[in-house]
Structures are given as structure tokens and as C-alpha cells.
Image: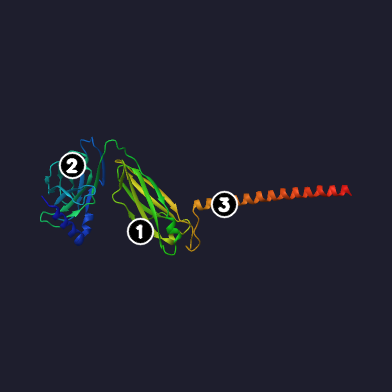
Amino acid sequence: MLTITFLALTISFTVVSGASNSDKVHQTPPEMVVAIESRAMAPLKCSHSIQDYNRILWYKQKRNDKQLQFLGYILLEDAKPEKGMAISGSAEKDQIAMLTIQNISMESSAVYFCAASIHNAEPAFFGKGTKLTVLEPLCNISPPTVVVLPPSEKECRDRKKQLKKTLVCVASGFYPDHVGVSWTVNGQSVTKGVASDHPALRVGDKYQITSRLRVEAREWYTEGTIFTCNVSFFNGTDTFNTSAEVYGSGDVNGTQTDAMTREEFVKVTQTAKLSYIVMIVKNIVYGVFVTILAWKLGIGRSHATAKK
């Protein structure tokens, strides 16, 4: 049985000496969602196109665990699985080796990796993994709700010091945690300045994930710029996409006075309306006062004329 130490050494050697060979190791499906009641599940498949390589190894990595658990291997067509696993097929170039989990349980939820190797301990090259989730009882499959938050008021006000602005995307209320987050600016995919939580955060019986996009201040202050957060969600059968967007503030030069928030605008307009009403009331009162005064003066003059 291979040790984790040997695995770590082979991974390190692969990254340094020829990571391109990892592109020649193909693993399917990328995601699986199964019910706890499942007695049987489709096998995980692995193939490679590396000349002379004839061994495929299988590993399991549980959530929040950096260590890998060895599950067995197949050399040519000779399989050596660990307990609870079944391995079949062929490990030769362009053939398919399969891993089947015989007894599904909650402990089966993990990411499974295959690695192509050769019998004389050459470097092992890993596939991209298969994420398997066993659905928890009483937890319903739910898609995410997505919102995008613009840069904070502090970032927007302090323009001279802040050369970049941070947009935040929050996807929440989904189960299971089979989501992917990506960003586009005016429809063009962007990866620079993107940082997403990994893994998703468990909140009650659902999950939440946050992604941040840092952009140049001039981008945010360009009117009409559309920043879109795209979230893909796999429900066990299909992948659905949900998105949310926010628009640039429209301050093209980034040197104008700060644009008012909605709350500030409402406050200012309400104050203006109140001032206008007060002014009208004052004018009315003044008009009434002048009218009464003129009327009294008129009566006084009339009496004076009568006495004469």
C-alpha cells in the first residue's frame, strides 16, 4: 500500500517536472450527487494518454482535510482495491479504469482523485477529481440566491487613496454545495482580481459562498459598465446558472464630488421640500397679515373721515 508521504513526493515532483502531463489524465464525471438510500451508484472513470504508463491509483479527500486516503490501484488489468471499493477496467493508455463505492454512507461524501503512474514509481499525474455528495436526510436540494454589492461608501468617498474598488457577490441558501462562481465585466470573462471562498460556508442546513472582484477605480466610475457575478449550481442531474449584476457609478473621471447614495438623495429632497413648504406657509401668513393690516388701516381712515 502506498503511503501519503510517497504521494506528496510524487505530487511535488509532478508540479516541478512536467505538470502538462496532468492534462493527459481525464476523470469523469466532475460532480456526483446521490441519495443516502442508493444501493448502487455509477462508477467513477479515469483514463490517460501518457505513453508507457500502466497503473492508475485512486484516492479520497474529505472536506477540510488536506490528507488523501488511498483506495487502491489497478496495474494493467490487475486490480488491488481497498475494503469497500471495487476497481475494474484497464490502466493502459487510452483505456478506462473504474472505481465503484460499494456501500454508500454519509462518509462517502468527498472528492475522489485518480492518478496515472507506472510500475517503477515514475511521477504520478493526477486528474481534476470528482466531487461526490451524499444527500443528508431532510435536506432539500435548493438553488442559490445571488446578489452583488457595490463598493462600500468608504471606498467610494476616499478616492485619492483608494485606487481599486471591491465588489462583493454573495450566493446563499443553496444545497448541496456544488457551485462555481465567475465574473464578467461588460460580458467579458475576468479572472484577475477575483477571490472566492473555498469551501462554501455551512449556514444551518444550507450553504453560502462569497466572491470578491477588485477592479480599477476608473472602471467602477465608468458609466454603463456592467459587473456580473455568475453562479453555476449542480443539483445532481443538471447545472443551472444564476447571475446578478451592478452598474458602474457613472463618475467617469473619478475626480468629481461623491455621488449621493439613495438615502442621502431622499434626505436632501425631503429637506428641500420641507423648506419650500415652510417658505410657502410664511408667505401665506405674511400675506394674511398684510391683508388684515390693510383692512384695519382702511377702517381707521373711514372712522377718521366720518368724525370730520
The numbered mark at residue 271 is 3
Q: Which of marks 3 and 2 is in front?
A: 3
Q: Nearer the viewer, residue 80 or 249?
A: 249
Identify which residue is drawn at 43% across, 58% down: 154
Residue extending farthest front: 307
Name the spot of residue 90 as percent of width and height, x first. Answer: 15, 47
Q: In this view, does 218 lie above or below 89?
A: below
Q: Where is residue 53 in the image (x, y as percent from the top left)?
A: 15, 54
Question: Is there any visible trace of residue 5 in the rendered image?
Answer: yes
Residue at the spot of label 1: 193
Q: For the residues marked 3 and 1, what is the alpha-carbon distance in whole angstroms?
A: 41 Å
How crowded is the residue under tag 2: few (<14 C-alpha within 10 Å), some, or many (20+)? some
On the image, numbered disc 2 is attached to which residue? 100
Which amino acid is tagged 3? Thr
When the figure is inspected, residue 199 is found, relative to residue 214, above or below; the finding is above
Query: Residue 185: horizontal and vertical position, in percent?
Result: 41, 55
